[in-house]
Each structure stands twice: as C-alpha cells, then as structure tokens.
C-alpha cells in the first residue's frame, strides 16, 4: 500500500485537538501534551495523564503577562505568539508528524476556550 508523503497530508480536527487540562482525560485524546509554561494549579501529574509537557512552546512570560487573557488583545497576541513560535519549527514539526499517525491533544489551563495559546498553536501546526 502506498502511503502519501506526510509533507502533503492534512491534519484533521479529530487528529489534533485542544482541551482544557481540567477536563477528564479521555481515551480519544491520544497523545496528551501540556503546552503551558507554568504547571496548572490543582492538577497532579497523575491526574494530568500527560505524555509530554512542552513549556518551551508556551508564550514567553512577557507575552503572557501583556496578554492577560484580554480578548481585546487577542489579534495582537496571536501575531506576537506566532512570531515566537517561528523559531520552534522542529518541535512543531514533531507534533505535526505525530498527529498524522495518531490523535494528539494540546492541553492548556486558561479559562477561555477561544482565546488561549493552544488555539494559536493548533493553527500553526495545522498550517505547517
């Protein structure tokens, strides 16, 4: 069977998803990656059921502080965070390649499901 070149395969939402770390882990999560710089409050390592923690993919402390989860700053946050991620291509590619073969879930702690670093990272990975 011929397997298409992974450089040209698209990742579906089923393969790469975003969830809040406080949600109960599910089998369908596949490979679970926490992408926050700071460990989430009130979550034990056992409860997190992580396969990886990649704080180096989180926004810088300065950017996170500036953003402050203010939706009014969302567009600028996305732009600045994407610029920070530009230097992390090998990590992004490794997640993308994993997501081509199995489900991957990017985990975050923020309360806002629409305005957080995991959403931006998901789009960057899908566009890679």
Image (spheres, rainbow, N blue to C red):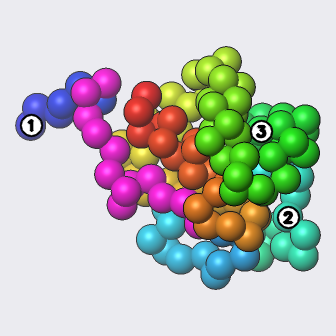
Tag 1 or tag 2, which sits nearer the N-term? 1
Label 2 and label 1: CA atoms lie apart by 44 Å
Q: Residue reaching furthest left? A: 1
Q: Nearer the viewer, residue 61 or 18?
A: 61
Taking the spot 85% from the left edge, 64% from the top edge, the residue there is 40
Q: Secondary structure at mark 1?
A: loop
Q: Which mark is residue 59?
A: 3
Q: Is residue 17 magenta?
A: yes
Image location of residue 64, percent across then percent down: 84, 44
Q: Quadrant of residue 115?
A: bottom right
Side of 76 where 30 appears, left or right: left
Q: Is residue 97 magenta?
A: no
Taking the spot 51% from the left edge, 28% from the top edge, the residue there is 93
Image location of residue 125, percent across then percent down: 48, 37
Whether residue 33 is visible, yes or no, is no
Read off the residue under disc 1.
Answer: 1
Q: Nearer the viewer, residue 61 or 78?
A: 78
Q: Are marks 2 and 1 in contact (CB under 8 Å)?
A: no
Image location of residue 73, percent across then percent down: 72, 46
Tag 1 or tag 3, which sits nearer the N-term? 1
Whether residue 57 is visible, yes or no, is yes
Near mark 2 (Cα within 10 A), the count class, few <14, some 14-19 or many ≥20, is some
Q: Secondary structure at mark 2?
A: loop
Label 3 and label 1: CA atoms lie apart by 41 Å
Taking the spot 64% from the left edge, 81% from the top edge, the residue there is 24
The quarter of the picture where the N terminus appears is top left
């Amino acid at each position: 069977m011929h397997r298409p070149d992974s450089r040209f395969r698209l990742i579906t939402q089923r393969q790469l998803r975003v969830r809040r770390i406080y949600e109960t882990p599910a089998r369908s999560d596949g490979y679970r990656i926490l992408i926050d710089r700071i460990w989430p409050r009130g979550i034990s390592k056992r409860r997190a059921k992580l396969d990886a923690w990649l704080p180096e993919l989180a926004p810088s402390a300065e950017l996170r502080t500036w953003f402050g989860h203010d939706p009014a700053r969302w567009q600028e946050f996305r732009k600045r965070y994407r610029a920070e991620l530009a230097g992390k291509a090998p990590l992004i590619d490794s997640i993308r390649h994993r997501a081509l073969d199995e489900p991957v879930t990017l985990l975050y702690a923020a309360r806002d499901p629409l305005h957080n670093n995991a959403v931006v990272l998901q789009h960057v990975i899908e566009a890679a």
